[in-house]
Image: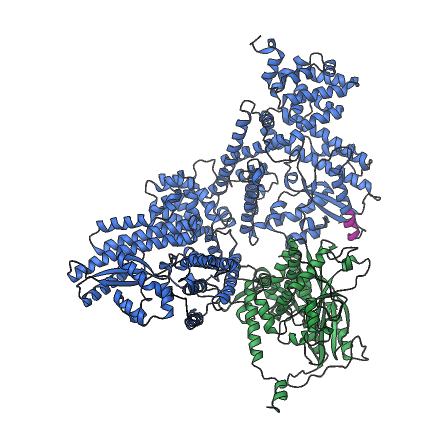
Amino acid sequence: MDRQQEFVLRTVEERDIRFIRLWFTDVLGMLKSVAVAPAELEQAFSEGIGFDGSAIEGLTRVYEADMIAKPDPSTFQILPWRGERHGTARMFCDLLTPDGQPSLADSRYVLKRALDRASDRGFTFYTHPEVEFYLFDAPADPSRPLVPVDQGGYFDHVPRGTAHDFRRAAITMLESMGISVEFSHHEAGPGQNEIDLRYADALTTADNIMTFRTVVKEVALEQGVFASFMPKPLADQPGSGMHTHLSLFEGDRNAFHEAGAPLELSKVARSFIAGLLTHAAEITAVTNQFVNSYKRLWGGAEAPSFICWGHNNRSALVRVPMYKPGKGNSSRVEYRAVDSATNPYLSFAVLLAAGLKGIEEGYELPEGADDDVWELTDAERKALGIEPLPTSLETAIEVMQRSELVAETLGEHVFDYFLRNKRQEWSEYRAQVTPYELQRFLPLI
Amino acid sequence: MSTSTGRGSSLATRLTRVGVADVPRAERLLADAALTAVDPDVVDHVVGDLADVGDPDAALLAIAKVAGAVRRDPTLSALLHDVLADDGHARRRLLAVTGASVAIGNTLAAHPGTLRVVADGTPGTGVPAADVRAELLRAVDADPDADVPVAGLAGVPGVDAMRRAYRTRLLRIAATDLTCGDPLSRLPGVGAALADLAAAALEASLALARADLDDHGRGVRLAVIGMGKAGGRELNYVSDVDVIYVAEPVDGTPEDAAMVTGARLAAGLARACSAPAGEPALWPVDAALRPEGKDGPLVRTLASHRAYYERWAKTWEFQALLKARPLAGDPELGRAYVATVNPLVWSAVQRENFVEDSQAMRRRVEAHVPRAEADRQLKLGVGGLRDVEFTVQLLQLVHGRADETIRSPSTLTALAALAAGGYVGREHAAQLAVCYRWMRMMEHRIQLHRLQRTHLVPTSDADLRRLARTMGLRVEGPEGLLERWRTTRRDVRRLHEELFYRPLLPATARLSTAEASLAPEAARARLAAIGYRDPAGAVRHIAALADGVSRRAAIQRQLLPVMLGWFADGADPDGGLLAFRRLSDQLGTTHWYLKLLRDSGTAAQRLAQVLSTSRYAADALRRSPESVRWLDDDAELAPRSAERLEAEADAVLRRAAEPVPAVTALRALRRRELARTAVADVLGVTTGVRASQSLTVTADAVLAGTLRVAESDARTAAGLDASPTRLLVVAMGRLGGREMAYSSDADVLFVHDPVPGADGKVAQDFAVAVATRVRQLLGSVGPEPTLSVDADLRPEGRNGPLARSFDAHVEYYQRWSSPWESQALLRARPVAGDHELGERFVALIDPLRYPAGGLDAATEREIRRIKARVEAERLPRGVDPSRHLKLGRGGISDVEWTAQLLQLQHAHAVPGLRTTSTLDALDAARDAGLLEEADTAVLREAWLLASRVRDANVLWTGRAEGAHADVLPHDRTALAGVARVLGHPSGSGAMLEETYLRSARRARVVVERVFYG
C-alpha cells in the first residue's frame, strides 16, 4: 500500500464517501463507470476490479470477457455535484488483462504508448483544447426542433444569460476538481459556448476532457438545460469543434521555438506540421469519428475542410498562432479539425504520431496558405496543391484503413475494432431515409 | 664476461635480469647527474629491488625525474637519499608505486613534497574514516567538528587544496596496496580506504560548495548518499562515484528555496570534484541513479524520494538502493534516508514482475558488451565483475527479506554472510570471493597505471607484462595472466550456478558439509524468484531426482543445479522440470543418458531448453528416447534425406512379414522423424520451410512403404499372385506442396491403371481395397502416431469412389472438371506407386492446371466467388477472422489462393509457375513481373509467419489435433509460450500478437488488390 493509496482510503473515510466510481473510456471515447463501495477499495488497489468487458465497445473480444480495471490513485477526486455529505468520488483506471498486462484495447494505454515513443526521442507532448458545445432547453427531444438557450453570438455578453451562469458554475466545479480553465466565452452559434482548458501533458489533458464532458453535462442538468457535444447539432449554425493546440518540449525547452527563424518556428515544428498535413486525411476518421462530424467539417463557417496551414489563417487546418515576443515556451500549433465528440486519447495519439513521423522523416513544410481557402476555386486549390479532408465518414474510413501510421499507433486490435465499428455506423446511416429526403422528393416524385 | 649471478655480473646483465626492457636507457638514467648527486650508490641501492616492480623502466625514469625535481631543495634531496638508501620499506614503496603507476610517478615529480608520504610507513588502509574526513576538511580550512563544515578556502585554490590532499592520501593507499605481502586479502581494505577517501573528498567539496554561497546554504540540510561501489565501500582507484542527494529545509526556510539551494550545493560539490581547475579532476560525480534519472530534479526531499520509490520505481532501482549508504553531508538525514528506503528494498522481491525484471536485468548484465571489447571487458559480460555482483545482489534480495544478517551493501561481506547463513555453499562462496578479489585487483592495477577510469584489459605486450608483474605473476608473464583471467571468468559462471541452484538440492543430497542446503521456505522463495510457478512441486521433483546414494542420484546432483537455471530461462520452468523428471525416471538406468548430459557441452542445456519450451517436443523426446542423443550433434538434428528414409523404410519392409507390424515400424520411423524435427525446430536448428520439408519427406516415405504393404496384403486377401492394376498415390494440398505442418493430414488421390488383360471390375475393386487398407493401416489407433490419409479432394469428393482408374480420370476431367478442381490439382504431386503412371497422370492434369491461354473471365470470376463464399462459410463460429491462421483475413489460405490464381492465369506461359510450392509460385510470379516485389515480400512473410505460428501452437501445447492449432492464441500464457517457441525472448506475447495481426492485415490488403482485382 503506498501513500497515495493510503491518502485515498483515509479521505474516503474522513469525508464519508459512500461510493467510488472507477472511470475508464471505451474505444469510441464514451466514459464508463463501475461503482465500488469503500470496503472494496483496498482490493481494487491491490488486484483491480474484474468486470465483463465484452459488453463494452471495443474493449474485448467476446471470448475474452474478463478484464481488470485498476484505479490510478493519483486521479482521485471527489465529485462535487454529488453533495458534501455521503459523497461520491472517482478515479481513472488503467485496464489490464487477467494476467496483469496492459490491455491493448485500452484507449488510455494507446496514448501512453504513443507518449512513450515520443519520450524515447526526448519529447514531451502538451495539448491545450478549446472545447465547444451547445446548450439547449431541456428536455432535448430528438424528434422536435432543438431550442438553444439564447440567441447570443461570438463573445456576446448575454444579460442574465443562462449560458453565463452556466459557464461560471461549470468552471467553479472544474476548478474544484483541479482542472484549470484558461478562458471561456460565448461562441458564434446561439447557445454555443467555448471553454478552454489550460495546457498540460497530453494524458492529463485527455483525462481532463473526459471529466470536463461529464461536469458540463452534470451542471446542465442542475440548471435545467441540456448540454451537447454533438459536432453539428444545428444545420444552419456553426458546429462544435475542439481546436487543439499542440507543442513538444525537450526537457524545459519548447522544441517548436527557434528565435529568429521565420515565424519563430524551429525545424522540428516545421516537420511536425508537415507530418500533420501529410497524414491529416488518414487520421480524420479518429479525430472526426461520427457521420455527423462531417457535417461540421463541410458546413463552411471557418471549418477546416482543406489540408493546408497558415499563420493566423482562420480557415486553415493547421494554424500557427501569432508569436508573442519573449514567450518562447508558448510556441505551438493549432490543429482545427478535431471535434468535441472525439475520443481524446486516440486523437492525441494519432496527432502526435503524425507529427513525429514528420520529424523522423524530415518532411518538408509546403508553402503556407494566406488566403481564405474557402474563397478559392477548385482549380485554384488544385494549382496550389491543397487537398480536401475526407468528405464523409465513408471516405475517411477508406483512407484510414490503408494507413500504416494509424494501425501502428492504435495497435492492431483497436485499429481493427474501430474500423469495423465505423463501417457499421456508416452502413446504418446510409440506410436512413431522412426528413430532408422526404421534404425534397416526396412532393416531387 | 661474467656469467655468474649477483653483484659480480655487469650492470647490463643485472638490469636485464630484473626485467628492464630498455637497458641502455636504464644505464643512462642510473648515471643521471641529478640522481647520482642525490645518491651516489643508487645502482647498488635500486637495481636489486627493481625485480619486484611492475615496470622497472618506468620506476627508474620516475626516480630520475624526482631527483631532478628535488635538486634545489636540500631537505627533500636528503629525504630522497634516505629513501633510496633505506634498507627497510621506504625504497620498496617508492619503486613499487612508480613501477605500477606512471601517474603517481608524475605526481611525485610535480609535487616532490609527497615523497614524505612514501618515506613514512604509516599504512594507507585501516585508517578510521573520520580521520580521513578530518584530513581533507582541514585541507580546505574547514572545521571537521562543526555540524555543517564550511571551507575557509574558496574557488580554485580551495579545489586544488582538496585535490592535492586527496592525491596524497591516494598515494599512501597505493603504496600500502602495492607493497603488502598478500594483496588479495588486502583488497577489501583498499576498496574501503578508497571509498572513505572519496567520501571525505565529497565532504570537503561540499564544504567548498557551501563556502561559495553567501549564507553558506544555511537553509538546507543536504546528505550525499553513496550508491554502487562507493555505497558498498568497495571503490576502485578511479571510477564514477554514484550518489543521490537528499535535502530538507532547515526550520523556517521554505521548501522551494531550500531545494534550489540544495541543487546549487550539489552542483558546486560536483564541480569541486570534476571540473577543470589547477589540479586534475578526481572523478565524475554521477547522480543518474536518482529518481527519474537524468530527467529528475537533482535534489529531492526525503518525502519526495519516498513517494517516488513507493509509486514509480522499477525493480532495478531497488537493487541499486541495496547499496545506499550515507557518504557525506548531514549524517542524521543520511541515516533517515537509508531507514526509509530499506524496507522498500527488502520487500522488492514481492513486487509484481520481479522475476521478469530480474531476468531482464541479468540479460542486460550479460549482453551489451561491444564486440570489439568482448575479449577485454573485466566488468561486463558473462563471468565479469558485474556478473558476480548481480548474483550476490539477487540472492540478497530473495533472502534478505526474512534475514537481516545478509543485507550488507558490500559484495564480499554479503557473500560471506550468505555463506554463514547457509544460503550458499561455504566452499563455493569462498571460491567466488577469490575470483572476485582477483578480478578487482586486476582492475585496480589497470587503473593505477595512468589513474584512468577503464575496465578494459590492455592489449600491448608492455602493458600486459607490467600488469602480470604487479599481479604477482612475474614468472607466468602475460600469457599466464590472460590464462588465469579466462579461467576465473569460467569459474565465475560455474560458481553462479553452484551458488544459486545447488543449495536447492535437499540436505540429503549434499556432497559435503561445506555445501548449503536451503530450508524449505528459503528454497521456495528462491525458486519463485527465478520463475517457478509451483515452487513446492519443484522442490519435490528436485528431491526425487537428487536423493539417494545411487550413481544416478550422484550425477543428478551435479547436473541439476545448472539445469534448474536453464529451465527457469524457458517459458514453462515447472513443465520443464517435470518432463525432465519423467525422462530421467525412464532413461536413468541406461548407461548413456546421464553420462551424455554430464559430459556433453550442449546436450543438457538443449534438453532443458526443449523441455521447458515445448510440450510436444518434450513428449516426442520421451517417446523416442534415443533422440536425447541428437541434442549433442547438429548433424543428427538435421532433416533426414528422402533417399535415406526410403532406404530405411525399404529395410523395414524387407524384415517384416506381417502387414500390421510392418506399418507399425513405419509409423515408428515417422514418430522418430517428428521428434527430430520438433526438437530441431524448438532449438532453432531447423525451422519454417526446412521443418515442413522434413515433415513432408517423412510422410512421403511412410506413404510409399504403406502402399507396398497394403498392395501385397490385398493380393493375399484376394488370392492373387500379381496385382491386376498398377497403383499411384498423388499427394495434394500441403503434402503436395511439401509444406506439411505438425497438424497436417495427408491429402491424396488414389489412381490406378489396370494391367493389359485385367478385368476392369477386379482391378477397380483391388485398387479400392488397397486404398482402404492404406488409410486403415495409417489411421488405426496404435502405439505409434497415426497419419490421417484424406482423399476428399478426389473427383466427386466423398461421393466418388476412393480410387479411380486413369481412364476414368481422363473421362471425368474431360466432362466435369470444375475450376476448384483445377486449382486443387496445382498441388498434385505423385508420391508413391508406379512411376510411369505418375508421369502420365501429370501429363493428363497439366493442361487442366496450367490451362493454355490462362483463365477466361467467367472462370476467374467463379474462383473469386468461391473464395468469397469460403471466407464467409468455412471460418468456425466465434473465431475472430483476424486471428484464424488458415482461413482468417491475410491468413494462409488468402495467400495460397492468390498464388494459385496467378498460376492458373499464367503458368502456361511462365514455366516457373508450374510448381506445387506456394513460396516458389510467389517468387516465380515476382520474377515474371506478375507480382510487385513489395507485394511478394508481404505475402511471403504473412504465409511464413502464419505457418510458423501454427506449428508453434502444436509445439507449445503438445497437441497436434484440434482447432486450437489454427488460431492465434488469446490466452496470454499460451501467446507468450508460442512466442518463446518461435525464439523470441520472454515477455514477447503481445509483440507476437501485434506482429501477426499486422502482417496478416498487410497481406489482406495485397490479396484484395491482387486476387479480387
Q: Residue at x 69, y 32 (%)?
A: B128
Most common SS among magenta residues: helix
Q: Is residue B618 left or right of residue B342?
A: left
Q: Is residue A21 visible?
A: no
Chain A shade in the render: green
Q: Please, is residue B77 above or below residue B102 in the view?
A: above
Q: Tell me which corner region of the image, top left, top right, bottom left or bottom right, holds residue B860.
A: bottom left
Determine the residue located farthest toward the bottom in the rendered image: A443
- In the image, A380 versus B665, the foreground residue is A380
Q: Please, is residue B339 above or below residue A204 in the view?
A: above
Q: Which segment is the magenta one? A: B255-262
Question: Residue A322, image x and y in percent?
Answer: 79, 64
Q: Residue at x 49, y 34 (%)?
A: B427
> Is B259 inside the magenta-drawn segment?
yes
Question: Residue B170, image x and y in percent?
Answer: 69, 30
- In the image, B637 versus B123, the foreground residue is B637
Q: Is residue B913 visible?
A: yes
Question: Residue B859, image x and y in percent?
Answer: 41, 71
